[in-house]
Amino acid sequence: MAFDQAFLDELNARSDILDVVGRYVQLKKTGSNYFGLCPFHNEKSPSFSVTPDKQMFYCFGCGAGGGVLSFIMRAEGLEFPDAVRFQAAQIGMQVPEKQGDPRAARHRERLLELSTEAARFFHRQLWLPEHASVAQYFLKRGLSRKTMNRFGLGYAPDGFSALLDAMREKGFSKEEVLDAGLASRSERGRVYDRFRNRVMFPIIDVRGQVIAFGGRVMDDSKPKYLNSPETSIFHKSRNLFALNMARKTKNDYFILAEGYMDVIALHQAGFDSAVASLGTSLTEEQVRLISRHTGKVVISYDADGAGQAAAQRAIDLLKKTDLQVKVLRIPGAKDPDEFIKEKGADAYRKLIERSESDNAYRLETIAAKYDLDEDEERVHFLHEAAEMLARIEGAVEREVYAGRAAKMAQVTVEAMEVEVRRALAVRQKKKKTAERREVRAVVSAAQPRDRTLQYQNVRSAKAEEGIIRLIFADDSLTDEIAARITPQEFTSQLLQKIFAHALTLHRQGRRVAVAAFEGYLEENEMQHLTAVLGGDRVNTTNWQQALDDYIGAIARCRMKSGADTGGEDPLLRMSRIHREKDRLGGNRI
């Protein structure tokens, strides 16, 4: 860990989880907890809880859980060190790196500095006289010099070590250039530039930092696009091209395009809310990023088969976060860049105004697969359209599009509605079956959600969970609990790890709280800890009886498994002695 523990304690003490979560989730108080719709999975009924006195969150639906920093890691798509820096900046705290281990943080800073220097190098190359033809490539594509400068466009020279040599002159090592994804190593160990003879598009995060690059060839050679690999500063699924600019738009919608050039052309034409995924299909993390900045998305993908398929996938992901989705159709199978060049920005703006809802788009896409003048084809269309319409939640909206489908197939609305009701009944039956299966799973879910954390002895582990809950409910009980049972007597490795760390925290005079385990437990372990603690308060009035019961259960499991074969189990014996003391009034209350 690269941070001083006292700093982390202060950061957690000054960060209220209600304030942090409230920036992302609308919460409503119910009893002592707060509930809202989980930001990490699609749901209609609130199962996401925040427990202020424990400074923790937990989703009963998807199992996400933890404290302030765990929430920021998930919500912002950050690793632990970056989440710490992010929250520190939010509340105005200076981050002191731990003196004993500054290497990881310094390495990240070096990679960010290197990426910035690389972007400057590529941009300078673009305007050198010997590379005039490259600048002409962008100019012929209709980009102004102002736009090229605004997006920091550049050129990677056609040499094996142009960038590598330039960065080494700046004081960066070969290994740093490799770690930044700007160089590759051959089988013989030779290090060479990853990007060569390509126009370059710097990828900039929402904080304005260059984190990666996309490179495009200027001819028909393959691969057409080459992107930076995953690095410690760049994760494709957690970033969007031009989001740093689009987030400042005054429009109430984002335009989702397919490629870098489309996005740049759109921005130049005045559509400053355009973004694109980074060389891959749209991801759930990217959808969550979009949903933080807008409630409406216009999909503007290419009108060819690949673009339509990508649009269908994007609709499914975008709808999960309740974003309003429209799909823009570009006449003539052209992309936004070509359309704007030929027809102009006003014509494209009219396309946005006439863009279809996601349901209309899907219906048109299904209709395009069939010859609706042929009876058999019409029947196939009606079956597929009915299944699509059955997925629409709202009855009124479903009826409207059923009428449209009937008109397209030249059948009566009543016939179409019968087919939709049939598809809806099949869908609801499947849904009920799935719900019953889920209820049974919840009832029998004694094991952790994550199978890698599976309990070897469920009964003992449930008692161990009870001991963990007691300590978190009142850590003043830690000494007396530690006198009765040791971590080594736990059967679950994770619960043993949590119990041991709780004892360490108590010996150090620190509070046993969820926040103190962030950065110590892995993400899946943190989620299970919050699942164990749950959202309810633990009644410690009769904690001694509860502890007796837990220890007794653990001891009986030990005896049953054959851990001790002779005499009375030490844990049972100690439990019996404490019960006798209780009866005689010898224990503290």
Image (tube, rainbow, N blue to C red):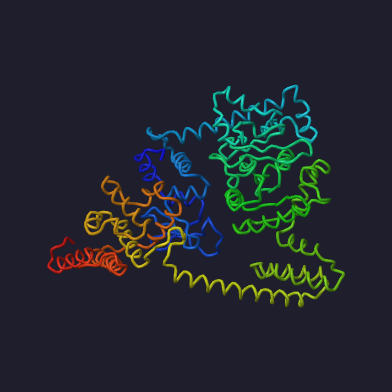
Q: In which quarter of the image is the N terminus?
A: top left
Q: Which residue is drawn at 64% across and 37% down?
A: 213
Q: Nearer the viewer, residue 456 or 502?
A: 456
Relative horizontal placement of residue 313, taking residue 107 as reference (left or right):
right
Relative horizontal placement of residue 263, taking residue 495 as reference (left or right):
right
Q: Residue at x 70, y 47 (%)?
A: 257
Q: In which quarter of the image is residue 140?
A: top right
Position in image of residue 589 (x %, y %): 18, 62
Q: Nearer the viewer, residue 39 or 438?
A: 438
Position in image of residue 364 (x %, y %): 78, 62
Position in image of residue 203 (x %, y %): 63, 38
Task: Using the image, determine if residue 117 lies above or below residue 203.
Answer: above
Position in image of residue 367 (x %, y %): 79, 64
Q: Total label count? A: 0
Q: Which of 160 and 124 is in front in this view?
A: 160
Q: Which of 562 and 323 is in front in this view?
A: 562
Task: Using the image, determine if residue 151 lies above or below residue 27.
Answer: above
Q: In which quarter of the image is residue 402?
A: bottom right
Q: Residue at x 43, y 60 (%)?
A: 29
Relative horizontal placement of residue 588, taking residue 326 as reference (left or right):
left
